[in-house]
Every structure is written in structure tokens, then in C-alpha cells.
Image: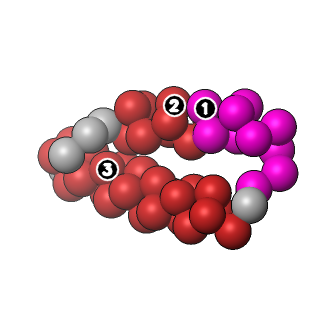
Amino acid sequence: MRSAAEVNEEIRALWRRTGGTLSAEERAEYELLVVEWAAAVRGAVVKAA
């Protein structure tokens, strides 16, 4: 599993690459990345507790 920071950087790169306008395919990629990012954040919180 990648860290939240790694996934966040990929999300930022996607937005830079597309100029802030996502196609349907890019929107699907973005949604998957957000789900992955959220899971990574939850995992980090559980480890911290």
C-alpha cells in the first residue's frame, strides 16, 4: 500500500497534467486515487492510535 503522501502527489500530478479539467477517463482515475488516498490516511491514523 502506498502512503497518503505518494497518492496525493499522483493526484496533484493528474491535475497539473490535465490543466484542471478532467475527461471522463481522468475523472475515473481521480476517483480511484481519492479512494486509495482515504484508505492510506485511515491506515496511518490506525497505526498512530
Q: Residue at x 57, y 57 (%)?
A: 30
- For disc 2, the marked residue is 9
Nearest to viewer (mark 1 / mark 2) = 1
At x 36%, y 50%, the residue is: 41
Q: Which residue is mark 1?
A: 13
Span shown in magenta? 13-22
Q: CA distance from mark 2 to mark 3?
A: 13 Å
Say left or right for 9 vs 7. right
- Main SS, magenta region, reads helix
**Amino acid at circle 1:** Ala
Q: Which residue sits at x=82%, y=44%?
A: 20
Indicate left or right for 35 with 30 as reference.
Answer: left
Residue type at mark 3? Ala
Q: Quadrant of residue 31?
A: bottom right
Above or below residue 49? Residue 9 is above
Q: Position of residue 7 (x, y in %)?
A: 42, 40
Say the numbered circle drawn on residue 40: 3
Q: Position of residue 37 (x, y in %)?
A: 42, 51
Residue 43: assigned label: none
Please say if the residues under marks 2 and 3 sit with CB atoms less than 8 Å apart: no
